[in-house]
Image (cartoon, helix red, strand yellow):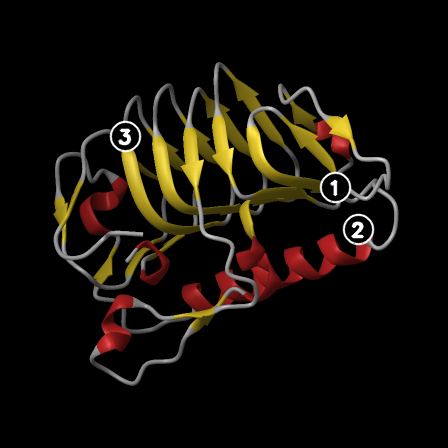
Amino acid sequence: KAENIFWQVAGSTTLHTTAHMEGTILCATAIVFQTGSSLNGKALAQTEVTLDAATIVTKKESRRRALAPRQLDEALPVVDLGTAGDFAILTKTGVTTTGVTSVTGDMGTSPIAATALTGFDLTMHSSTTYSTSDLVTGQIFAASYTSPTPSKMTTAISDMETAYTDAAGRVDPDYLNLGAGIIEGMTLAPGLYKWGSSVGFTNLKFKGNCVG
């Protein structure tokens, strides 16, 4: 399942035109979704997320303790997303979209203000604690919104950083730096994948159950 797949990337992540990905992306820098690309999962970036007519779908599973695929058979520690798991997209420095993007799930950014959420034509809710957009099926949060949103976002970002550190610290991944980050056309089996570089692809297949 998508919630059992984790991608820990020390560089940037690029989904090229029409590429599809499953799982949670824990990225140390930026995540770029090129035209028509899609993700069934979560995009958690420690800088920004850029979308171009992209589609992102996630299940809202608050404070869920997700299992890495190999844990189905072995007693490995979990990658705990904490409150970061409440978001389809979570960033530190904003989200930009062009084209007809579709996001199913909540979106948030912190510590940067809502002005870094561009292309979404935001509508502020009367509570001023969140906003909405025709492109997002869910709520949108930023550090500049009314309390308790700033505290909520600080916690979510901290949980994202903790989850990234946990994944990065795994000393026994199934695959390390596969293809030097160029995984175009590969078929990926279940397991824990780690890269110390950027990752990019257009065509990718998953072996096993990747149904969300």
Mark sitting earlier along the chain (3/1): 3
Q: Tell me how far mark 1 sits from mark 2, CA to CA.
A: 7 Å
Secondary structure under badge 3? Answer: loop
- Residue 149 disc label: 2
The answer to the question of whether label 2 and label 3 lie on touching residues, with beta carbons closer than 8 A, is no
**Which residue shows up at 48% across the image and 23% down it?**
101
Q: Quadrant of residue 62?
A: bottom right
The crowding category of the residue bearing disc 3, from other C-alpha atoms within 10 Å (few below 14, some 14 to 19, many at least 20), is many
**Which residue shows up at 65% across the image and 55% down it?**
157
In front: label 2 or label 3: 2
Q: Which residue is mark 3?
A: 19
- Judged left or right of residue 156, residue 49 is left
Is residue 56 at least partly visible in the picture? yes
- Residue 142 disc label: 1
Mark sitting earlier along the chain (2/3): 3
- Judged left or right of residue 113, residue 106 is left
- Judged left or right of residue 81, residue 39 is left
* Residue type marked 2: Thr
Residue 1 picture location, percent across and down: 28, 58
* Residue type marked 1: Ala
Secondary structure under badge 1? Answer: strand
Q: Residue furthest top?
A: 99
Is residue 198 at least partly visible in the picture? no
- Residue 190 disc label: none
Mark sitting earlier along the chain (1/2): 1
Q: Residue furthest front?
A: 126
Pick the residue in front: 182 or 94: 94
